[in-house]
Image (cartoon, coloured by chain):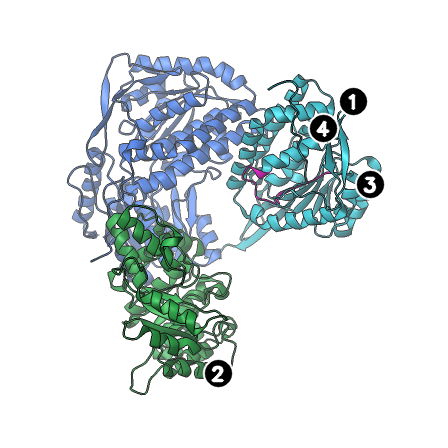
Chain colours: A green, B blue, C cyan
Amino acid sequence: MADVTASDGALRRFLHGLPGVDAVGLEARAAALGTRSIKTTAKAYAIDLAISMIDLTTLEGADTPGKVRALCAKGVNPDPTDRGAPKVAAICVYPDMVGTAKAALGDSGIHVASVATAFPSGRAGMPVKLADTTEAVAAGADEIDMVIDRGAFLSGRYLSVFEEIQQVKAACRRADGSAAHLKVIFETGELSTYDNVRRASWLAMLAGADFIKTSTGKVAVNATPPVTLLMLEAVRDFRDAVGVRVGVKPAGGIRTTKDAIKYLVMVNETLGEEWLTGEWFRFGASSLLNDLLMQRQKLSTGRYSGPDYVTVD
Amino acid sequence: MTFAYAPAPESRSVVDIAPSYGLFIDGEFTEAAGAKVFKTVSPASEEVLSEVAHAAAEDVDRAVRAARKAFEKWSALPGAERAKYLFRIARIIQERSRELAVLETLDNGKPIRESRDSDLPLVAAHFFYYAGWADKLPYAGFGADPRPLGVAGQVIPWNFPLLMLAWKIAPALAAGNTVVLKPAETTPLSALFFADICRQAGLPKGVVNIITGDGSTGAELVTHPGVDKVAFTGSTEVGKAIARTVAGTDKKLTLELGGKAANIVFDDAPVDQAVEGIVNGIFFNQGHVCCAGSRLLVQESVADEILDALKRRMSTLRVGDPLDKNTDIGAINSPEQLARIRELADAGEAEGAERWAPSCELPSTGYWFAPTLFTGVTQAHRIAREEIFGPVLSVLTFRTPAEAVEKANNTPYGLSAGVWTEKGSRILWMADKLRAGIVWANTFNKFDPASPFGGYKESGFGREGGRHGLEAYLNVG
Amino acid sequence: MSADRLSVLKTYKLYVGGKFPRSESGRVYEVTDSKGDWLANAPLSSRKDARDAVVAARKAFGGWSGATAYNRGQVLYRVAEMLEGRRDQFVSEVAEAEGLSKAKATAQVDAAVDRWVWYAGWSDKVAQIAGSANPVAGPFFNLSTPEPTGVVAVLAPQDSSFLGLVSVLAPAIVTGNTAVVVASEKSPLPALSLAEVLATSDVPGGVVNVLSGRTGEIAAPLAAHQDVNAIDLAGAGPELAKELEASAADNLKRVLRPRPADWSADPGTERLLAFLETKTVWHPMGA
């Protein structure tokens, strides 16, 4: 596939040669998968799986080390009344909080993910974006969630977006030769069309993304089932064409167990069992965790739970 | 541990099926003259659901006379009053939709997902739509004072029992006719429940009469001299027989018959949605759909890619208990239909086409057929020419748009067609050339009460649905 | 109920954006029955109330016009169901307002409910009588479809406080327009009560906004408003109508002139078609 990224023109021809997406059909398929009825044992399995896929996130101007430490504690032990509850996949923070999170998580096995590249807008020069990334990696980030330059993408400068991803990928490398995992955020709410989402998916995967991620959570439209389904399909087709596996992370707006299970059904029926692990599928979320925990309590006790029985962090 | 969906059965307790049913004539359930009955069976379990009266000639006569008697007052009612009856029926159907969906799934074998999300919403919508026409007939484009025809004799099939009832009864009543309707022998129950809905709506006696029986009952109905209008949905063979019997009478006739639709996929199609459309086109309702996209015509340049994707998608179809909310493909409606599907599929193999089906475990009781596709099919094969009316897809290829049109039209049928391409001008060019009553572009099997449905050639004549659907029940001469 | 029990009176309010505000003016005016006896105080709307109502109607337009015709039909049919449930209330309000016997008022209200049903049924049919496939001389698909014009200011008839009101409001909104209704000046109470029905049915807030007060005072800013697309002058006298029509010319509002009307007669399709735009789409046909 190297020749398709040889020039701006070649990359454009390739991306615009991908099959089109019929919006009505895509949305209908996502809605149909949303009608799957996941009950009893399957529901218990799905809830624990969803918890273990969460990138528990705080990305606020008001974040402090105290807030981040509290979130880390929750990530390790989500349900104080049930130590059997699975831990989350990662804690997702701004770069300056990586050190705090890393220390708080210790050897829990939970990753620290850091947003980077002038998140959420991505409006900064390349040196700033790379410095943002290297700082986070140096502080111990296991995963980097970068944003693409949507302005460049929408104005058709695909090669520029491609090269930015490659450079950030290079900045993810550590001195020992290992590398932080790179998640590439499209901000699908700003890309606006499904055709653009498919093109962005291929572009990022060609550039070396380990994960493709829908959104920052900072704009009006974040992850939706159709957009995520489309990205899962792109990952499936990329695997078939190139033989490389890529993960998917919907982020923003997923707040209920019911929603989370719909996403798991989409993964199950599009990519299959292989992707049903925190290694290949993540939820970027914060309030989702408590709803999952309340549903989990309901399954084990038979009573509906309430917000007083989960923690506020 | 895997993400295996646990059983999610819809509760049967929402529907209360009586051990036996009579005929609904003149607002009351009565026994058939000969006291003859037949059993209706759940095709998924072979369980007997109920015993139903078999209407004989004199019962048909009684029903037609009841309809005739009711016609005078019903047709003289102001349209606004007829409209309100139909609105009531629509609302009661909405209220009782869960019950009716479960009933339909039990009697027919279709997945609850479809009866719940497709059949029942369309049934209610159809009554709503035609309710609105009842007081607007002078605006429908059939003259200033269009008149009803009289008594309509209506015979419907087993694939969408309640929906086909709605397609027949709603426009007939809106236009001021009264009806005698015969549901299919294997799926009589939802029509009998509809009789109860008429009771709840306070519909005057005799406006709707439901008689149950087999083909002989249907033949008595369509030949009855008191019937002014015959509407039939079913096989082309029976349709032709009916056309012969009404020859020389004043009976107005509309027929909605078989099909062998081409679903045409070009190389610039939106692939994932096209694959969904192919699956929906042939496996919706177990392929028991007259407008099913049973011939896939795929452009040679993308045939392998599309077939790989199609097979992958077919492998995720869930076949089994129709009452399970996660079932995609339910039971074949009857042993007779299953035998016909098997016979044609075997003929496909014998004639040299290559048969493929995903591995799927079929239940041990009931009537089942795995979703199946045949590749290497040509226009000469029986499976490319005859309507299978089951979950069997025949795949053919083409090279150019002109060849696609030629192959698509190369059938005595002409009910529907599908076109998949991102190029708008090609869609419209194809639509212009295709000899079919419905052309779906980048979608398939879409139905709406506002949209006319019906075929060219041996797929029948007349349209159901939309403004056009009124014409079948009005004296427009 | 004992005969000497003191009844609880209703405070009549405006209906704007799905809420029930008092008039921004803080003023009310006295509404009397046909004999001149006091019935209630109704809000006296100001030009700012008119402005707020237009903003609400504009905001609701996208959602309401974008809903499927089937959905709009269902929503409007639901209104008829709710009206039927409040039949007695409307009968007494209409009887008092118009000085009618109970039987005559009942006939008015029943006709109004049936009229609402008649228009509800038009939602998914109007395109089928007002649209067309056009056989142009060339390889083109050519289709004309009606679309709602936008925000419609409706001056309700002065003499028929409920049947007349329904007869002008329902046809404007069924096709997807949103409306600012100025109630009958002398008899605004049925209109203000209709707002309560709309608020408890499924009609989205802002689709219908109801103002009471001096028709001339409220109508002037509506007729001149640059974000109003059409105006139905049913409730305006000849002088006022002429003035408003001239004012409406500023942004070329679609204008329906007032004329003597028998509100109990078959309404036909005039009002239904008055506030529609026709859009024609061309597309080539070629392989």
> Image quadrant of residue A184?
bottom left
Which disc is residue A128 wearing? 2
Amino acid type at mark 2: Val
Q: Are marks 1 and 2 on the same chain?
A: no
Q: Which mark is residue C35?
A: 1
- Magenta stretch, residue numbers: C199-212
Mark 1 or mark 4, earlier in chain: 1
Q: Is residue C98 above or below residue B361?
A: above
Front-lying residue, B384 or B114: B114
Amino acid under disc 1: Lys
> On the image, numbered disc 4 is attached to which residue?
C160
Callouts 1 and 3 in the same chain: yes
Q: Is residue A72 left or right of residue C145?
A: left
Q: Chain of mark 1?
A: C
Image side of residue C259 versus residue B419, left or right: right
Q: Position of residue C238 (x, y in %)?
A: 82, 36
| In magenta stretch: residue A30 | no
Residue A161 appearing in the image: yes
**Could you tell me which secondary element the residue under label 1 belongs to?**
loop
Residue A306 or A191: which is nearer the viewer?
Answer: A306
Residue type at the position of mark 4 = Ser
Percent x, y of residue B369 = 21, 43
Q: Residue at x 28, y 26 (%)?
A: B17
Residue A106, compared with residue A272, is above or below; it is: below
Residue found farthest to the left: B364
The residue wearing badge 3 is C242
In space, the residues marked 4 and 2 are separated at their CA atoms by: 71 Å
